[in-house]
Amino acid sequence: MAKKQKSRTIAVRLISMAMTGFFRTMIRPRTHRPLSMMKYDPVVRKQVLFLEQKRSKNK
């Protein structure tokens, strides 16, 4: 039996660099580089940098 083909997109978690614990979930193409963007963090009520969290191999 053949292996199932991997999805073209993956769901990633963007973590606030204000260290508030707030995160956003986004979908990006598997082939793109990791996401980083300025978004609003409601905990500190400011726009802050959000970086993609490293995925762990453990489940």
Image (tube, rainbow, N blue to C red):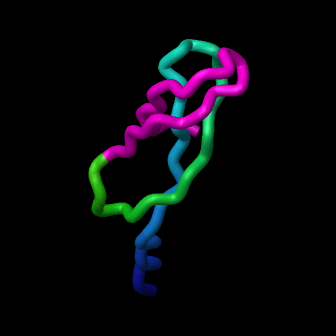
* Residue 10 point in image, percent of width and height: 48, 59
Q: Residue furthest right?
A: 43
Q: Residue furthest bottom?
A: 1
Q: Would you say residue 32 is visible in this rendering?
A: yes
Residue drawn at (54%, 36%), measured in percent from left and top?
39
Where does the C terminus fall, quadrant-wise?
top right
Q: Was residue 37 drawn as part of the magenta stretch in this picture?
A: yes
* Residue 41 point in image, percent of width and height: 63, 27
Residue 53 horizontal side relative to residue 44, left or right: left
* Residue 35 point in image, percent of width and height: 38, 44
Residue drawn at (54%, 27%), measured in percent from left and top?
47
* Residue 54 point in image, percent of width and height: 42, 33
For residue 42, what is the image quadrant? top right
In the image, residue 25 above or below residue 40: below
Residue drawn at (46%, 66%), measured in percent from left and top?
9
Who is closer to the viewer here, 29 or 55? 29
Residue 24 horizontal side relative to residue 2, left or right: right
Residue drawn at (66%, 15%), measured in percent from left and top?
44
Who is closer to the viewer here, 17 or 1? 17
Q: Which residues are magenta?
A: 34-59
Q: Was residue 22 drawn as part of the magenta stretch in this picture?
A: no
In the image, residue 27 above or below residue 52: below
For residue 28, what is the image quadrant? bottom left
Task: Tell me how many marks there are.
Answer: 0
In the image, residue 11 above or below residue 14: below
Who is closer to the viewer here, 46 or 10? 46
Where does the N terminus fall, quadrant-wise?
bottom left
Q: Would you say residue 53 is visible in this rendering?
A: no
